[in-house]
Amino acid sequence: MYNFASVYIVEINKKRPMKTLVIIPSRLSATRLPGKPLLKINGISMISHVFKKAEEANIGEVLVATEDQEIIDDVKKNGGQAVLTKKQHKTGTDRIYEALEKFDDPDIDLVMNLQGDEPLMNIEDIRNLNDQMIKNQSQLGTLASIIRDKKIYNNQNIVKVETKNKLNNSNFPEAINFMRNISQQTENTYHHLGIYCYQKKTLKNFVSFDQSSNELKNKLEQLRALDNRIKINVALAISSPIGVDTEEDFVAIKKIMEYKS
């Protein structure tokens, strides 16, 4: 006799695939380039380019987290989903945690924090970071690329990361440190990219910690994680996308994206 009850128990005990939510923090009041999320490239706002890129990666639902109704309206007009968060957040990570709580899906396992000012982020790199997090069961992961221009070492706007081991296409070593300036090149120093993937419980722990002195001094949130013994693993990225911090950055990215179209 076929035992439907036992089959049902087997089915519900099967381990479900890990579920990722991509959250993109965005706000209009950026210090160096106010209003940048809504700057247009090929007739579409930069923030909408970013969420469309995240959707193409197809690793999970995509949500924009913002304090500005104008961004909400723009994202929804372009087919995305967004949530309004409070204005008082000190960091983008605090903003994505509020958005996660508002999204209210208990099945979320991983939270991908994708920066709203990097519309050239490579889709395969996004997928690779998500895959490495699942494969290695890491607490927190990020991306870095090989530095090919030595001027980057002294560029304070480009963050560098030092890893325990040399990066390759398949490994996921731990980060030792993150820095803006370095006095000399070290063996395993790379260009850090502004993308993070957290286990949900790690994200909850991270936002519960006070900002560390290292974080405040260097203006780097990831140092809060290292200062509180949260391991950060690093995957090698295919590309080194330009982030938009200044008007010059925006003009450069606009030219690249308009040329590609």
Image (tube, helix red, strand yellow):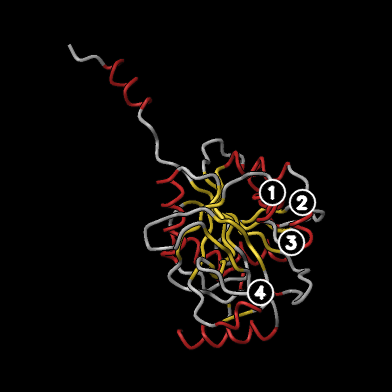
The numbered dot on residue 183 is: 4
Of residues 132 and 175, the one nearer the viewer is 175
Asked whether the beta carbons under mark 2 and mark 3 sit within 8 Å of each other, the answer is no
Distance Cα–Cα, label 3 vs label 1:
35 Å
Look at the image and tell me in which quarter the N terminus lies: top left
x and y percentages locating residue 21 in the rendered image? 53, 49
Mark before the other along the chain sequence, 3 or 1? 3
Identify residue for label 3.
Answer: 69
Distance Cα–Cα, label 4 vs label 3:
43 Å
Asked whether the beta carbons under mark 4 and mark 2 sit within 8 Å of each other, the answer is no
Identify residue for label 1.
Answer: 227
Distance Cα–Cα, label 2 vs label 1:
7 Å
Of residues 194 and 145, the one nearer the viewer is 145
Q: Please report the residue visible at 70 percent of the width from the left and 61 percent of the height from the top.
A: 220
Asked whether the beta carbons under mark 2 and mark 1 sit within 8 Å of each other, the answer is yes
Task: Report which quarter residue 40 is drawn in.
Answer: bottom right
Count neighbours of disc 1 (C-alpha within 10 A) and say few if under 14, some if 14 to 19, many if 20 or more: some
Distance Cα–Cα, label 4 vs label 1:
22 Å
- Compared to residue 254, the image places residue 229 above or below, namely above
In the image, farthest residue toward the left: 1
Badge 2 element: loop
- Compared to residue 195, the image places residue 157 above or below, namely below
Badge 1 element: helix
Amino acid, disc 2: Ser
Amino acid, disc 1: Asp
Distance Cα–Cα, label 2 vs label 3:
31 Å
x and y percentages locating residue 121 in the rendered image? 51, 69
Mark before the other along the chain sequence, 2 or 3? 3
Could you tell whether 67 is left or right of 258 in the image? right
Q: Please report the residue visible at 47 percent of the width from the left and 51 percent of the height from the top.
A: 60
The numbered dot on residue 212 is: 2
x and y percentages locating residue 17 in the rendered image? 40, 40
